[in-house]
Image: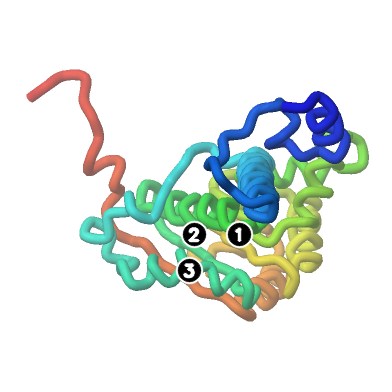
């Protein structure tokens, strides 16, 4: 390839030409050739954007809707999962609350939504409640937390995992309420918790604040209660074979 083309491609950040190699069909007209280059560049940029969104999301692992066992977990149907996977509810700024004991699939569903959303062009963030509280508390003194807050404010979806597993102080509860208030009607939120709404006042230590929080979160919200046996316990692997 002409060195000047490569040089200009790098200058204008046309990545598919910047390395001097591109595999296109033979016999194309000038217009078809140019269109093919633009299509290749558009595809390359989208792939990079997906990788960046997945990196920023900080998912602990990949979980998909296809892996969820609705025959085992009766608290959600295949039809409901299909509706969640369409992601139309994100555009309508709905929230999703997943409540149930450990091992019932709450985080699996949250991650399945998050992974699908990030691949479909939505900005997503995943944090445990404990980690999120740490970010909120340190955003004024930590550059990492400040940077992370900047990303959170750009997000279309924020997933908050394991609410209720660790105690929250009154100051931390106020930080959390301020974030939810800021996100209200601008960003969708998924929360997983091992406690029902009647236990959230105990988690946050303030019944009045909890009522105000729930008022915002549940304004547009789907609640799923997953109360069956733990999938991990039922399918645990043993060192010793029986």
The local crowd at label 2, few if under 14, some if 14 to 19, many if 20 or more residues have their Cα within 10 Å, is some
Disc 2: which residue? 195
Q: Nearer the viewer, mark 3 or mark 2?
A: 3
Secondary structure found at label 3: helix
- Tell me whether the residue at label 2 lies in contact with that at label 1, contact meaning CB atoms closer than 8 angstroms: yes
**In front here: 210 or 75?**
75
Q: Does residue 162 appear in the picture of this structure?
A: yes
Looking at the rendering, in which quadrant would you find the N terminus? top right
Does residue 195 appear to the left or right of 148 in the view shown? left
Q: Does residue 129 appear in the picture of this structure?
A: no
Q: What distance separates the C-alpha of mark 1 from that of mark 3?
A: 35 Å
Q: Quadrant of residue 31?
A: bottom right
Disc 1: which residue? 202
Q: What distance separates the C-alpha of mark 2 from that of mark 1?
A: 10 Å
Residue 55 percent location from the top left of the image: 65, 38
Question: Residue at point 85% right, 40% down?
Answer: 12
Question: Residue at point 57% right, 59% down?
Answer: 191
Q: Considering only vertical position in the picture, is 39 above or below 187? A: above
The local crowd at label 3, few if under 14, some if 14 to 19, many if 20 or more residues have their Cα within 10 Å, is few
**In front here: 13 or 99?**
13
Residue 30 percent location from the top left of the image: 69, 50
Furthest residue toward left: 242
Q: Which mark is residue 86?
A: 3
Q: Considering only vertical position in the picture, is 238 above or below 33? A: above
């Amino acid at each position: 390839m002409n060195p000047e083309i490569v040089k200009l491609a790098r200058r204008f950040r046309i990545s598919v030409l910047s390395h001097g190699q591109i595999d296109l069909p033979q016999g194309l007209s000038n217009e078809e050739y140019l269109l093919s280059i633009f299509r290749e560049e558009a595809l390359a940029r989208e792939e990079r954007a997906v990788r960046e969104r997945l990196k920023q999301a900080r998912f602990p692992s990949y979980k998909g809707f296809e892996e969820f066992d609705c025959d085992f977990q009766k608290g959600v149907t295949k039809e409901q999962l299909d509706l969640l996977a369409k992601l139309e509810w994100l555009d309508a700024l709905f929230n999703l609350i997943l409540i149930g004991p450990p091992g019932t699939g709450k985080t699996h569903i949250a991650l399945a939504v998050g992974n699908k959303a990030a691949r479909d062009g939505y900005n997503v963030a995943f944090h445990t409640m404990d980690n999120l509280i740490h970010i909120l508390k340190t955003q004024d003194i930590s550059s990492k937390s400040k940077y992370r807050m900047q990303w959170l404010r750009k997000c279309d979806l924020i997933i908050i995992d394991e609410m209720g597993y660790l105690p929250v102080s009154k100051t931390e509860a106020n930080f959390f309420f301020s974030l939810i208030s800021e996100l209200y009607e601008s960003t969708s939120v998924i929360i997983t918790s091992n406690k029902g709404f009647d236990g959230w006042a105990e988690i946050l230590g303030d019944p009045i604040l909890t009522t105000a929080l729930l008022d915002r979160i549940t304004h547009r919200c789907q609640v799923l209660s997953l109360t069956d046996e733990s999938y991990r316990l039922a399918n645990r692997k043993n060192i010793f074979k029986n």
